[in-house]
Image (tube, helix red, strand yellow):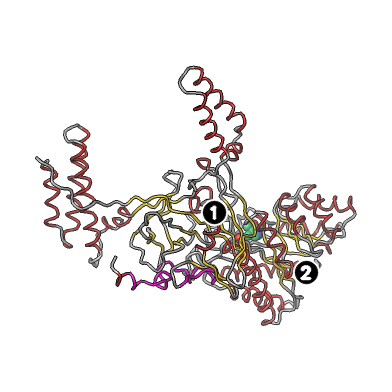
Amino acid sequence: MNQQFKSSWESKNSAELYGINRWSNDYFGLSKDGKVTAKTLNTEVTLMDIVEGMIERDLQMPVLLRIENILDAQIMRLNEAFRSAIKQSNYLSAYRGVYPIKVNQQAQVVEEIAAFGERYGHGFEVGSKPEMIAALSTLKEPGSLIICNGYKDQEFIDLGLQAIKLGFQCFFVIETPTELPIIIDRSKALGIEPTIGVRIKMTSQVSGRWNSTSGDRSIFGLTTSQLIDVVDSLKQENMLHCLKLLHCHLGSQIPNIRDIRGGVVEASRYYADLVNEGASLSHIDLGGGLAVDYTGACSNDDQSRNYSLEEYCADIVETLKHTLDEYSIDHPIIITESGRATVAYSSVLIFNILDTNTFETNGLPEPLPDEHPLLIKMREIFEYLKAESVQECYNDAHYYRDEIRALFKRGQIDLRSRSVAENLFLDILHRIADLLETLARIPPDLENLKLSLADIYYGNFSLFQSLPDIWAIDQLFPIMPLHRLDEEPTREAVLADITCDCDGKIDTFVGEHETVATLPLHPLKSGEEYYLGVFLVGAYQETLGDLHNLFGDTNVVSVRLNHDASFDFVKEIHGDTIADVLSYVEYQPAQMELNYRNTAERAVKEGRITARERQQMIKTFKASMQGYTYYEKEN
Ligand SMILES: *Cc1c(COP(=O)(O)O)cnc(C)c1O
């Protein structure tokens, strides 16, 4: 690459290419010297400096990096945005946020939310007994909010009632009519009055891929007749005053703000009529749904959103006020259960590239002596290869290559000739691909040509373990190199993971204008690692992952950025060892070692190896058992 060409590419070109300023929500940017930085108020640190710190601590790739300040900043933004929307519209009550633990249940994340969220009274939404116990043991302030969703048995309800007695604001949200008698019985038995919510089944239809269960067939929530039954039962028990909260959840990642507004109108109608029925409602919980703009497109596409956080808050507050004022009903405390938007930004999966496969030839192969006529035919294609004849040349190249493959199978052409044919074929395709750039219209047959010639970059990570949503539901996450961004990326690549499973690949990326099939990357430099980051992976990825090929949990590092642009490693968790993952699938590592010792001992007895060799083999075996499941670099 000549100097002049190199200097014409700057970080800002990379910023445009990878769209970092569109999807990063201001938490990531680029330094002038071509490195990705993490940013929060008054400070900016390059991720490569953090990677260096990991290497010094022998934390091998892949690593899941959590940036605590970003998590804090998101909680702050959410609470402040609701506060200012409330002030702006003269809404006469408050906002209280809760974090749904299911979105990322890791103790480090939940503890940080509890610690930072305390200043805003940010609480938790729980959907099971384990989540309830996590909430009870992390929240410190009396008065903290706990919203209990999901099916609740007697034990769950006892935990909640005792929490109320302790001073928590714990709401039992009734999802099915069968829960109510248990709540009433246990509350009488323990002598503690419950605070109750009802979850309604919304009929507002919501677009977006996670939301096919919204509407009448929603599996959660009470139908209107069940709701009336609950109200009547509570009246009968003289407990209608315990019904304080109305709950609805339209779905996750709602891309279109109009759907959210429609849902709030419907919820307000329920709220008003329940108040008229005599319930002393004081809280309205609008669930999750606040979307993350993964593509940065700012559109109502599934992986994006057509609104800002400020607009989301303002729309909710104004719609509630407007609807309830019509009925002269007091403004309730607004609760939302934003999970995805709270945690997505704070985690980045970082991995190194182990190898690449480029589908290229080193120039035209020299003609062999007595070259087969089909090979000569193939060479002739170069003579008539022009923009006007790309389709014809493409067809011919395929025809001759396939003929040669058939001859090879029948033993009529040798391996060396076949290799020449494959190289000629690739060379022709590359020249066709170059010519396509000059065409106004690309023939349909050739649309995927660029993809079929793309490099494969092999990454040191497992898609199944670390990015399950890419594999399961084609989720898009922004991916880009962490460094060399002041250099033009001259390769086009798809990513393959370390599992060597054909599903373990990524071939859809956030592009400059739309999603694209290949990611622009830099050629590897020998003796230098090349690091990529997968961004916005804090939500829904960590616990859904599986042990495909027995690749286990990755190393996790939490950092905190300081005002002077330094940073601290505040927490580190070493990922699973090989012994760990084997025991998850019920192997017994101690027994396995014993078996191997015995196998080696037999080999000694039979004179196939020496006792000293046996010793060495057992040492390697034991060290492997305690090692990381991913590709390790020896120091
Ligand atoms: C999953 C879930 C949430 C979280 O939704 P996000 O879209 O991630 O904010 C909130 N509330 C309930 C009841 C949920 O099931």
Query: What amino acid type is highlighted by mark number 1?
Result: Val
Residue 10 forms part of the magenta stretch: yes
Name the secondary structure under disc 2: loop
Going by the image, does 362 lie left or right of 475?
Answer: left
Figure quarter occupied by ligand 1? bottom right
Q: Is 90 on the left-hand or right-hand side of 351?
A: right
- The magenta stretch is 6-31
Could you tell me which quadrant the N terminus lies in?
bottom left
Q: Residues within 10 Å of mark 1 (few under 14, many from 20)?
A: many
Q: Is residue 500 above or below residue 495?
A: above
Which label sits on residue 282?
2
Residue for point 61% across, 36% down: 583
- Is residue 195 positioned above or below 603 on the image? below
Q: Quadrant of residue 560?
A: bottom right
Q: Residue furthest front?
A: 612
Return the residue nearer the eye: 245 or 230: 245
Percent of width and height locating residue 192: 88, 56
Q: Which residue is mark 1?
A: 63
